[in-house]
Amino acid sequence: MSLRGDDNLNPIINLMQAGLDGAVMRQRTISDNIANANTPGYKRKDVNFRQILNKKMTIEGKENSLQLITTHKKHNDLSNRKAKKFKVVTDRNSEYKNDANNVDIDEEMAQMAKNNIYYNTLSQTLSGRFRMLKNVIEKGGK
C-alpha cells in the first residue's frame, strides 16, 4: 500500500510510511552485513533514515513539528527543505578483524533486533491509525 500519491492525506501517516520504508531498507542492509561477516575486506553498511526522518520532523529547530507541504505553486514554501532519499552509507573508517572486515556479528544482531522493534512499533501504530480512520468513515454518518 502506498500513500505517496497524496502527500496531504495525513502527514503523520506519510511520515510513518517513510519510517517503515527506512526500516525495511535498514533490515536488508543489516542482513547483508551478517551475510558478509566472514568476507575479507567487506565493510559494514548502514542506512541514514533516522537522521533524515528527524530532520523532516524538525522545522526551525522546533522538535515534533512537521514540515509544511505546499499544494499549489503559488503557496509559500516555508520549510526550505527538500525531501531526501535514504542512503546506504559504508563505514570505511574502522577495522574489526585482521582481514580488513569491520562487521561485528554481535553488534549487527543487536541492531537487527532494535530495528525489528522499531518496525513493529511503527506498523502497529500505523495499523491503529487506519482502524481509527475506518471507524470514522463507517460510523461518521450514523
Image: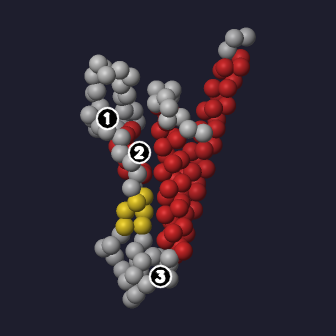
Q: Position of residue 136 (x, y in %)?
A: 66, 20
CA distance for labels 1 and 3:
42 Å
At label 3, which amino acid type do we have?
Thr
Give the answer, above or below, for where 88 lies relative to 128.
Answer: below
- Mark 1 sits on what residue? 59
Q: Secondary structure at mark 3?
A: loop
Query: Who comes first in sequence, dot 1 or dot 2?
Result: 2
Between circles 1 and 3, the one closer to the viewer is 3
Residue shown at 47% from the left, 76% from the top = 104
Q: Estimate the x, y position of residue 106 in percent, counting from the top left.
A: 52, 74
Q: Secondary structure at mark 1?
A: loop
Distance (Cα) linking label 2 and label 3: 32 Å
- Asked if residue 110 can be seen in this view, the reply is no
**Residue 66 place in picture, x, y as percent:** 39, 33
Tell me if label 2 and label 3 are in contact, CB under 8 Å: no
Q: Which sits earlier in the primary sequence, circle 2 or circle 3?
A: 3
Q: Earlier in the sequence, mark 1 or mark 3?
A: 3
Is residue 4 in view? Answer: yes
> Which mark is on residue 39?
3
- The image shows residue 83 at horizontal and vertical percentages of 36, 41
Based on the displayed image, in which of its 4 quarters is residue 72 positioned? top left
Bin the neighbour count of mark 3 within 10 Å (Cα to Cα): few under 14, some 14-19, many 20 and up. Answer: some
Q: Amino acid at mark 2?
A: Leu
Q: Which residue is mark 2?
A: 53
Q: CA distance from mark 1 to mark 2?
A: 12 Å
Q: Nearer the viewer, residue 23 or 83?
A: 83
93 on left or right of 4: left
Is residue 125 positioned above or below 31 on the image? Answer: above
Residue type pointed to by label 1: Ile
At 63% from the left edge and 43% from the top edge, which residue is drawn? 124
